[in-house]
Amino acid sequence: MCSSGTHFVLTVSQPLTISTVNPKGGTGKTTIAVHLAVAACREGYSTHLVDTDPQGSALDWGRMNPDGYDGPEVHRVSKEKSVAPFVTGAQVVIVDSPARLDERTGAVLSVSDVALVPVRPSALDLWGTSEFLELLKERADAGLQAAFVASQTDARTTLTAELRGELEGAGLPLLDGLASRVAYARSMSEGETVLDGYNRTAADEVRVLIREVGELVS
């Protein structure tokens, strides 16, 4: 159940579907999806978190939520089912996509208003991301808002600036993302997020990210 919020971080005037997409695993895709879903929910929007990844990590997180947790409804979509019916019925829907490039990737992108591509600051991650850039750009040309999100960066270095330079040629913006912090993994392992008092700096990172997402569609 989502609490009543003031909408000062994210402003949504019509239903919004945001997907986290990267065919390479280990990029922090689910962590970003879960935290954005909780942040939107805490803003007072009816929010659904849709898990289409065969690993089911977002669903596992939802099952560990404490009783009465102030968070989104979590739905699992198996490979045999269509994603489309699950992106209705809420003001904000966050879709965690499969960590591989297949027909599900296109299906998720086709129902999304915003696609976020988490990337870590390493050449290997960039190589993996380039595998589906053509599909992403095709959808962007059709009206999809897309952006890279810096993920698991080291807050003590300038890796985000280096990553921004590497991605310049892709023609998509790079949003400030979530740094590499123990608080993210710890909070999720307990069915919560950093917004639940685990780390103030990390919580601020989440709020900045959801505000930047809102600016993409404003």
Image: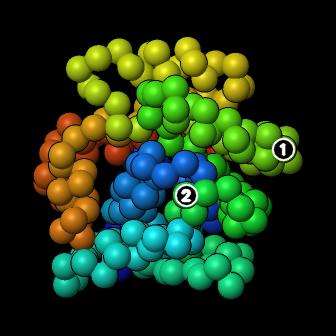
Image quarter of the N terminus: bottom left
Query: Can you identify the residue that label 1 sits on?
Result: 138
Residue at 25 percent across and 78 percent down: it is 64
Asked if residue 192 lies left or right of residue 148, the reply is left
The amino acid type found where label 2 is placed reads Ala
Q: Residues within 10 Å of mark 1 (few under 14, many from 20)?
A: few
Query: Can you identify the residue that label 2 sits on?
Result: 99
Asked if residue 163 lies left or right of residue 206, the reply is right
Q: Secondary structure at mark 1?
A: helix
Asked if residue 34 lies left or right of residue 198, the reply is right
Residue 191: x and y in percent read: 24, 70
Circles 1, 2 touching at the beta carbon (< 8 Å): no
Q: Which of 140 and 118 lies nearest the eye of the viewer?
A: 118
Image quarter of the C terminus: top right
* Residue occupying the far front of the picture: 124
Is residue 6 something one can see in this rendering?
A: no
